[in-house]
Image: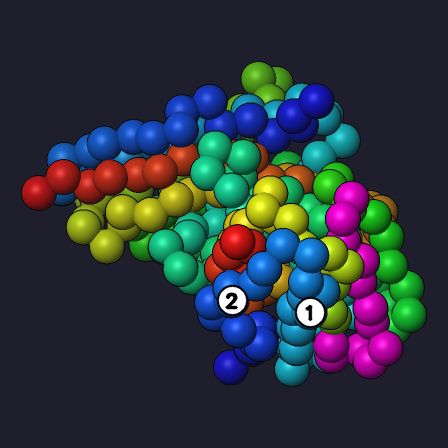
Amino acid sequence: DVKVTQSSRYLVKRTGEKVFLECVQDMDHENMFWYRQDPGLGLRLIYFSYDVKMKEKGDIPEGYSVSREKKERFSLILESASTNQTSMYLCASRQERSNEQFFGPGTRLTVL
Amino acid sequence: DQQVKQNSPSLSVQEGRISILNCDYTNSMFDYFLWYKKYPAEGPTFLISISSIKDKNEDGRFTVFLNKSAKHLSLHIVPSQPGDSAVYFCAARRTMNRDDKIIFGKGTRLHILP
């Protein structure tokens, strides 16, 4: 059974903290993605990666960075968390040239 | 500029009736379309897809229709069941380019009424 796992389901952090969100997939997929979901705004792409050590900016990369040191793992980093980064964060992976994207369960992050 | 538009933020349908969710797109280069379903506190899950060479794809209670000339697709759920209450995302991509992202709409929240 295919699986994308995220390190935390719920996370509460304080403004200014550095936050790490981890995502691991066991499908040997080349492509991995980070989205945030907010009411009325749908799924917005933050960053994506097509291969190890490769990263591309999505639609809303400001305030975020990513790391992909291993094929199965894609990390999202909030260098200095702010309240407007309170959101549901979703990781996804996809095999190259495939049309179906598999999502993790999401991390609901609250920044106080 | 939104390339994939779901103009209805929410929709309420009586249990047992047909649910029709609509989606419009602007990029004529899109050649593959998908629908995802999302429950609260869970990640989206793939529901059904259609290639641009087809105009209909059916899977059980779910049917997706594609009208390329109108750049419009719709998801039909018949009959609607309580478990269908969720947010539905329409998505599209260009399959020729490996670097192309899947573009998602903003979603439509479907409420199935008892």
Q: Residue at x 49, y 28 (%)?
A: B6
The chain letter under disc 1 is A
Q: Is residue A15 above or below residue A75?
A: above
Dot label at residue B76: none
Please identify the dominant SS of the magenta region. Answer: strand
Kindly state the secondary structure of the residue where label 2 is placed: strand
Residue occupying the point 76% across, 48% down: A63
Range covered by the magenta-colored residues: A62-73
Residue that numbered label 2 is attached to: A11
| Marked residue chain, label 2 | A
Q: Position of residue B95 (x, y in %)?
A: 76, 47
Relative to A1, residue A37 above or below: above
Identify which amino acid the numbered label 2 is placed on. Answer: Leu
Q: Give left or right: position of B75 versus B46.
A: left
Is residue B71 rendered to the left or right of residue B39?
right
Q: Residue furthest top?
A: B70
Residue type of the residue flagged with mark 1: Phe
What secondary structure is marked by label 1? Answer: strand
- Residue B85 horizontal/vertical position (percent): 27, 47
Please rate how many residues cluster around mark 2, counting C-alpha atoms within 10 Å: few if below 14, some from 14 to 19, many from 20: some
